[in-house]
Image: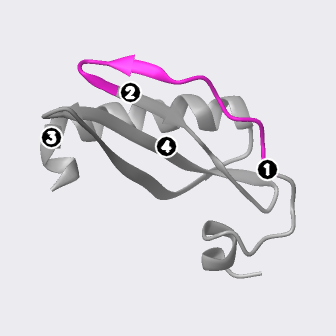
Amino acid sequence: MSFFKKLFGGGNSAPEPQAEAVAYKDFRITPAPLKEGDGFRIAALIEAEVEGETKSHQLVRADVIRDREEAIAASVRKAQQMIDEQGLRLFG
């Protein structure tokens, strides 16, 4: 099965339970590693309130990590790095 089918819902595997959201600066990070073969692709949803509206950015990286908990931690770290580098420009 191709990466894009898995990414956009064409997979037939059961979804992993959602990880708990993490507050970082004025953002909310919800780690959501994607099952990829025998590992997990780094992914997270980054959200923030901007002028009364919730804005979101879906982060998906090429990195695949075998352990789900490690993938969750790596997803949070990568999202924090993006927030530090881009701030609200993530949404524009």
- In what element is the residue under mark 3? helix
In this view, the residue in front, 68 or 53, is 53
Mark 3 is surrounded, within 10 Å at the Cα level, by few (under 14), some (14 to 19) or many (20 or more) other residues, namely some
> Residue 41 has which mark?
none
Tell me the amino acid under the disc marked 3. Leu
Residue beneath disc 2: 28
Q: Which residue is mark 1?
A: 15
| Disc 4 crowd, CA 10 A, few/some/many (<14, 14-19, 20+) | many
Residue type, numbered disc 4 = Ala
Q: Amino acid at mark 1?
A: Pro
Q: Predominant secondary structure in magenta?
A: loop
**Label located before the other in sequence (1 or 2):** 1
- Asked whether, in this view, residue 27 is left or right of residue 15, the answer is left
Task: Verify whether residue 23 appears in magenta.
Answer: yes
Mark 2: secondary structure: strand
Quadrant for the N terminus in the image: bottom right
The relative height of residue 91 versus residue 68 in the rendered view (above or below) is below
User: Are the two marked residues, 4 and 2, in contact with CB atoms closer than 8 angstroms?
Assistant: no
Q: Is residue 87 magenta?
A: no
User: SS for tag 1?
Assistant: loop
The residue wearing badge 4 is 44
